[in-house]
Amino acid sequence: MSYFSLNPFESEENHEGDIDTITLIREQMLTDIERIQAILFDDTYVVDQDYENLSDEEKKICDNFLKFYSICPICKGENHKDDLMRFYFEETEFTKKLRDNLLKLMDNSKNYKNKIVIGIPCCQCFKKIFGSTKNI
């Protein structure tokens, strides 16, 4: 009798080979599920690991960045922390330069005499202003 047998009259013999097969299939399924989770959620896991690897001073800078840019300057809606974290740890040359400029702007904003609204637009406002993000 195999484990997946539809015949209710098959004998109930010792089927250790079947149990080994079931265990093997179960382990493969768990591996596949972990792989799918990594594909779907890996960036969050990697970002969390990147954050944990920061020094205390670097964590403070990152936390200040997340707090400062957490509100959309246009609609006043909340930006998603995960999106900000992915941006903060992105390693492309353009993103690094933009992040560095945003950090400088954040630091210098304390010195502004006029009330200037600084921020990162939320996804909806970004799409309204710049259109499709496919070309970016």
Image (spheres, rainbow, N blue to C red):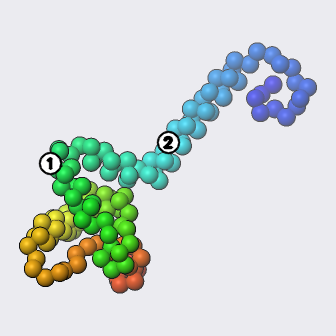
Q: Which residue lies furthest to the right in this view?
A: 9
Q: Residue 57 carries which label?
A: 1
Q: Residue 91 carries which label?
A: none
10 over 43 or under it: above or below: above
Provide residue 121's location: percent of width, then percent of height.
32, 75
Q: Which amino acid does label 2 sit on?
A: Glu
State whether residue 100 appears in this view. yes
Left or right: 110 in relation to 124: left
Left or right: 135 in relation to 66: right
20 over 129 or under it: above or below: above
Q: Which amino acid does label 1 sit on?
A: Glu
- Residue at point 74% right, 19% down? 15
70 over 43 or under it: above or below: below
In-front residue for pair 27/81 = 81
Q: Are marks 2 and 1 in contact (CB under 8 Å)?
A: no
Provide residue 38's location: percent of width, then percent of height.
44, 47
Provide residue 113's location: percent of width, then percent of height.
9, 79
- Residue at point 31% right, 65% down? 70
Distance from disc 2 to disc 1, alpha carbons, whole Å, reads 33 Å
State whether residue 136 appears in this view. no
Closer mark to the observer between disc 2 and disc 1: 1
Q: Which residue lies furthest to the top in this view?
A: 14
- Residue at point 37% right, 53% down? 43
- Residue at point 17% right, 81% down? 115
